[in-house]
Image (cartoon, rainbow, N blue to C red):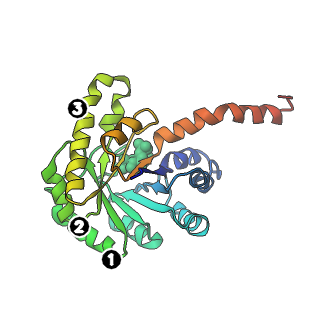
Amino acid sequence: MQTTLSVNLNAVAMLRNRRDLPWPSVEGLGRIALQSGASGLTVHPRPDQRHIRFSDLPIIRNLIDDEFPNAEFNIEGYPTEEFLDLCVGVAPEQVTLVPDDPSQATSDHGWDFRKRRDFLTDVIARLKKMGTRVSLFADGDGDAEAVAIAKTVGADRIELYTGPYGGCYDAPERVGPILEALGKTADAALAIGLGVNAGHDLTVANLPPLVMRIPKLAEVSIGHGLTADALEFGMAETVRRFCRACGQKI
Ligand SMILES: CC(=O)[C@@H](O)[C@H](O)COP(=O)(O)O
Ligand SMILES: NCC(=O)COP(=O)(O)O
């Protein structure tokens, strides 16, 4: 089984939102991502629209439908009525429910499945009526009982929150137990028929050990690290183009 990549466009949208200009283009970079081998696009529309704007969603839906009909649209977020209406409007192939408070800078924990069981059961039933696959953001702490609740509330998959794993980039001695806990959580999910996704602070450096520990990892969604690499690896050619635009012969 191959792990697929869904490119999260939130970081691109955040750069675009610095100015009242249409670049960098969320649609254009989404197109390049899909042309280059990504299997899907992820967005996380936050209530204040500080990254992805609600108006981006139909544009990405049309991009996929018109040019990449096999690609997957994954929408992440806390299931407010506003969020659920957005999902109804663009019928994503996958919705990833995340327990984010609007005041959070970014996602930093999974669901408390024991406390939110009834809420999640209701929301997932509504999403399933649309035929959407539902994934639940989950802490990768090896808690098999929590994972079992994710199954009983109707989820198809869990998405392992890999923030603490990504946070070990400068402390490799801390990686071992964190990776093993993620692996145990995945083992528990796979054993009861839940699919496993992962995301948050994943990079080219930390992906290989994760995929080796969880060979049945279905999908990773990556935004921040991927956008950082796109800037770094695209900088040289971009500077050359601007130098040429200045009239320099390089
Ligand atoms: C669910 C998750 O891990 C988050 O990745 C999120 O999608 C990132 O969102 P921001 O880019 O808005 O911080
Ligand atoms: N679900 C995680 C995601 O979409 C991207 O997270 P990040 O790579 O921006 O940290």
User: Residue 183, position in %: x, y?
Assistant: 25, 42
Residue 21 in percent (x, y) is at 65, 51
At horizontal 47% and vertical 41% (from top left) the residue drawn is 224
Q: Residues within 10 Å of mark 2 (few under 14, many from 20)?
A: some
Q: Which residue is mark 1?
A: 129
The CA distance from mark 2 to mark 3 is 29 Å
Observer-side mark, 2 or 3, equals 3
The quarter of the image holding the C terminus is: top right
3D distance between C-alphas at marks 1 and 3: 39 Å
Of the numbered discs 2 and 1, the one sitting upstream in the chain is: 1
Give the residue pinned by disc 2.
154
Q: Looking at the picture, does residue 107 appear above or below residue 248?
A: below
**Looking at the rendered structure, which numbered label has been put on residue 177?**
3
Q: Name the amino acid, label 3.
A: Pro
Amino acid on which disc 1 is placed: Lys
In which quarter of the view is residue 237 placed? Answer: top right
Q: Is residue 134 visible?
A: yes
Measure the C-alpha gap from mark 2 to mark 1: 12 Å
Q: Given contact means CB atoms under 8 Å apart, are the residues at marks 2 and 1 in contact?
A: no
Front: mark 1 or 3: 3
